[in-house]
């Protein structure tokens, strides 16, 4: 399991480094226009206009607050990182909005897994450690993908947050449903 966690963390670090490299291109680079377009598209998906304005202003305020300390150390870096930071804040807000769904799905997955485990104990069924480890790996990698999608501007579309939440739930069900009877 340590190898899996190490690989997932290494992949996340590599993806974040690529994101930082692309985000720190010159201000006239096309990637910054893409970030601005994506912010507009993400905010257009929010049905409430007041919530859209609030998200846009909060993202701009937070991006400015983060870029002010950057401007003392690297002024050029602070100006170039502004669109990247705004997009990251908007994506993080959307990921936080999906957290109740994630929590509910994980609770259901754990409950179903424990019910399956109890059924296997009573009927002398087969507990597969392989499926337990696969469930743990699925839950861990999906949680990492959820975090990356919620924080990175170069991640998959935000609707994938629901897919990752379902995958975490499935992984938890497999993990807890196949644990050995005596722990």
Image (spheres, rainbow, N blue to C red):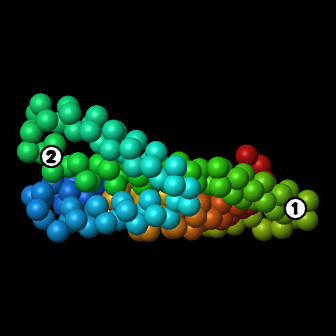
Q: Would you say residue 41 is visible in this rendering?
A: yes
Q: Is residue 70 above or below residue 29?
A: above
Q: Position of residue 114 (x, y in %)?
A: 79, 55
Q: How many marks?
A: 2
Picture quarter containing residue 149? bottom left
Which residue lies at the image location 65% right of the left edge and 60% below the top edge? 169
Q: Position of residue 152 (x, y in %)?
A: 35, 56
Name the residue carrying label 1: 119
Asked whether, in this view, residue 107 is left or right of residue 26, the answer is: right
Q: Position of residue 57 (x, y in %)?
A: 38, 44
What label does residue 181 carry, if any?
Answer: none
Name the residue carrying label 2: 79
Judging from the image, what secondary structure is the residue with disc 2 in?
helix
Q: As rendered, which of 79 and 142 lies closer to the eye?
A: 79
Q: Position of residue 86 (x, y in %)?
A: 32, 50
Which residue lies at the image location 78% right of the left edge and 68% below the top edge? 126
Asked whether, in this view, residue 67 is left or right of residue 96, the answer is: left
Q: Would you say residue 2 is visible in this rendering?
A: no
Which residue lies at the image location 87% right of the left edge and 62% below the top edge? 119
Q: As rendered, which of 140 and 35 lies closer to the eye?
A: 35
Q: Is residue 66 above or below residue 40?
A: above
Q: Residue furthest front?
A: 49
């Amino acid at each position: 399991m340590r190898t899996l966690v190490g690989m997932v963390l290494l992949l996340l670090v590599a993806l974040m480094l690529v994101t930082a490299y692309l985000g720190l291109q010159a201000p006239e680079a096309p990637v910054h226009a893409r970030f601005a377009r994506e912010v507009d598209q993400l905010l257009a998906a929010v049905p409430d206009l007041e919530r859209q304005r609030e998200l846009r202003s909060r993202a701009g305020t937070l991006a400015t607050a983060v870029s002010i300390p950057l401007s003392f150390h690297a002024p050029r870096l602070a100006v170039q990182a502004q669109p990247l930071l705004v997009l990251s804040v908007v994506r993080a807000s959307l990921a936080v909005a999906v957290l109740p769904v994630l929590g509910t799905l994980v609770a259901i997955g754990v409950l179903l897994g424990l019910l399956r485990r109890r059924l296997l104990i009573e009927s002398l069924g087969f507990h597969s450690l392989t499926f337990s480890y696969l469930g743990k790996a699925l839950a861990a990698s999906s949680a990492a993908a959820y975090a990356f999608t919620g924080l990175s501007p170069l991640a998959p579309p935000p609707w994938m947050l629901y897919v990752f939440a379902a995958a975490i739930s499935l992984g938890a069900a497999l993990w807890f449903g196949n644990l050995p009877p005596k722990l």
